[in-house]
Every structure is written in C-alpha cells, then in structure tokens.
Amino acid sequence: MITPAKRLDTVQEYYFSRKGKEVAKMNAEGKDIISLAIGSPDMPPSQQTIDTLCSEAQNPNAHGYQPTVGIPELRGAMSRFYKRWYDVDLDPATEIQPLIGSKEGILHVTLAFVNPGEKVLVPNPGYPTYTSLSNLLGADIVNYNLLPDQQWQPDFEQLEQLVSQNEANIANGQAEPPFKLLWINYPNMPTGAKAQRQTYERIVAFAQRHNLVVVNDNPYSFILNQGEKLSILQIPGAKDCCIEFNSMSKSHNMPGWRVGMLATNAQFVQWILKVKSNIDSGTFRAMQLAAAQAYDNTEDWHQQANITTYANRRAMAEEIMTLLGCEYDKEQVGMFLWGRIPEHYENVEELTERVLHEARVFITPGFIFGSNGSRYVRISLCAKDDKFAEALKRVKSVFAR
C-alpha cells in the first residue's frame, strides 16, 4: 500500500484552499458570494511596471535561465527602495536576496537555520505559514502571546522565561534542543498593530542576549500607514542577528507576480542562497526588470494605491464590523480590519457562517491565526468599492433587523 510521508500528518490543507472550494460550490449554485477574506490586492501595478514587462518580454534573448541571486538591476532597485523609504543601507551585491514571494523565504530560512527538533518561536495569533512550514520541516514550534492589552506587541516576559528556562536546562545537561528562530511580523497581520521602534529595539537586544535569529516579515508598511516606515534593520546591530522580508504583493499590487526579498548580513544571505539555489532557478528576466521599475514608483502612486483606495474601503469595513457587533481598534494599519466578536456567540464560526450563508459574504474567522484569535474576525479590504458597498448592504439586511 502506498502511503504519504508522515510529515503530512503535521499539517492540514490551507484554510483558504479548503474553504475556497465551499465558496466556489456556492457560487456555482448562483449564490454570488462576495469575498472579503483573502488579502489579494485587486488593483493593478503601476502602468510603468506593466509597460516594462511587456517591452522586455519582446527581447528574444530574455527567456533563458536567470541567476538565483537575481539580476543586478533588481538587487540595486531593492537597495534603493530600502534607502529611500527606511533609510537603511544595504549592499545590493551581498545583503539582499530576491525571493519568489515571502512564503518561499519562510521555507528557505527555516531550512538554513533550523535542524529537525530545534525550537522556533511563532506568534499567536500569526500568519499560519510560520506554523505549517515549521511543522513540515520537523521544527518544534513554541508559541508566544500577542495580546490586545499589550497592543499586540510581543509578550517579552513570556519570551524571556521560555528561552532562559531552555538555556538553563541545556546548561544542566538536559538533552534539550535550542531555540533558533523568532518570527515577528509588523505592521502585524492579522491584528493591524503598528510597528513600534521600541519593540524592534527590545527584540534585537533579546536576540543578541540569546543568540537567536529574528525574522521580521514586513509587507504591510505601506498600507494605510501614513507615518514613518519602520524596519527592524534600522536598529543598531540588527543586521547581525535579524532578517527582514519585504514583498511586492501588497505594497505594489503584485501578488501574482511572486516577487519579494530578504535583507540581512552577507553571511546569512550566503547560507540561505545555498538552500535556495538547490530548490529553484531565477525569476523570468522581464519580470525582474519590471519589478525593478516598480520599486521606483512615485510617492503619489503609493498614496493613491495604498492609502486613498484602502481608506474608502476601510470605512465600509468598519460599518460592517459595527453591524456585526464587533469591537475594533481604529488605529489599525494594513489591508485588513480585525475585530472582537460579541460575547453571546459561542464561537467565531457561529458568526462567520451566518455571514456567509445568510448575507452571502465571506469573512475570515480568527482562529486560523491561533488560539488568541479565536474570538476575532478579519475583513479584507481587497474588493472593489462596488462589491464592498454590496457586501455592506447584504450584512445590513441580515444584522440590522
């Protein structure tokens, strides 16, 4: 009898893949479900980005294999982007690695730094892929809390206790695997919590004390975030122990292009490249050149694409949250709205399933991000204004009776 690898027992099919089949079936039955669930930007990249792709794709010499390290034009654009928006200096030749989106970066970084059985710190709530890929690779996942009374910033007292106790056990001769990675994600998904310089400073100091590698997943700093753009690499000494992901999916309306990057010190880049170069080849040259063009988008483009458009939708999302009786923080940033459900619901799916089947609107239950999200829902802002208005109308017809 043929059986799958045991590692498949550690994961389930991704929630949106599984639930998407149900929604597709409902649509096939003519129910016309409006999805406010997935964070897939529905607007196009800048026109210059598209024009560059089309033009470069006409080059008959542009269709061969490309270097895994990325072409110099793309790495140079990534370096300029970090200097322009974050005031972080990166050597484009040695301190940047282009990625086929941040999700593959999670795989490559874990393979490069974590042996099977070693410990990885994952936020609760947090992006599900931090957990699923760690499980597939045999890491020991240890969750740490993000809580609303701490503005969804890391619980440093808990982190210190977890890691210090582990170090004490090892020092006392116990066969205890060490902690190797700490995942953070600011501006935060799913909670919308803003990045805070103080948090970054404490995270870097914590990593230096305990010889950990920190990975900050930073794709949301342009979405409804009109303040200073923060990067953990702004903190002195961060580059020695931190890796930062950035993605063009959200900030440049390019989710299907699968272009992202990581930035860190040259040694870390080389270790990660050793993994990546054995798994994939470089991205299509025309796409890399188009991505390089996108990194030079004007501030006006970002204002319109990442602030004005989402602000209009955010107002409607807040109306939906209010109709559902949910509490939410108006200071959230990013392309989602995160709200706590009323106490009279036994569980979050009691609400989200009613919204789906009665209002025909698909929103996300927070439990998929961890136990600390079990009393929350998330609304994506990635739907056209007319669809959002219709979703609001449908929810109002059911919940404003």
Image (cartoon, rainbow, N blue to C red):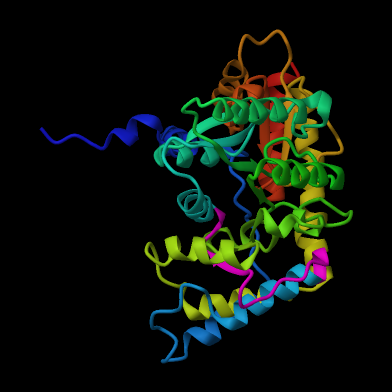
Rendered location of residue 188, percent (x, y) = 72, 42
Image quarter where the N terminus lies is top left
Q: Residue at x 52, y 32 (%)?
A: 141
The magenta-colored residue range is 84-102
Rendered location of residue 223, percent (x, y) = 76, 53
| Residue 320 location, quadrant | top right
- From the viewer's perspective, tell me whether residue 194 is left or right of residue 145: right
Rendered location of residue 10, percent (x, y) = 39, 31
Rendered location of residue 29, percent (x, y) = 42, 34
Closer-to-camera residue (2/270): 270
Q: Residue furthest bottom?
A: 60
Q: Residue at x 33, y 35 (%)?
A: 8
Q: Residue at x 75, y 47 (%)?
A: 204
Residue 355 magenta-highlighted: no
Q: Residue furthest right?
A: 227
| Residue 85 location, quadrant | bottom right
Q: Is residue 249 above or below residue 34?
A: below
Image quarter where the C terminus lies is top right
- Residue 295 visible in this rendered orientation of the protein: no
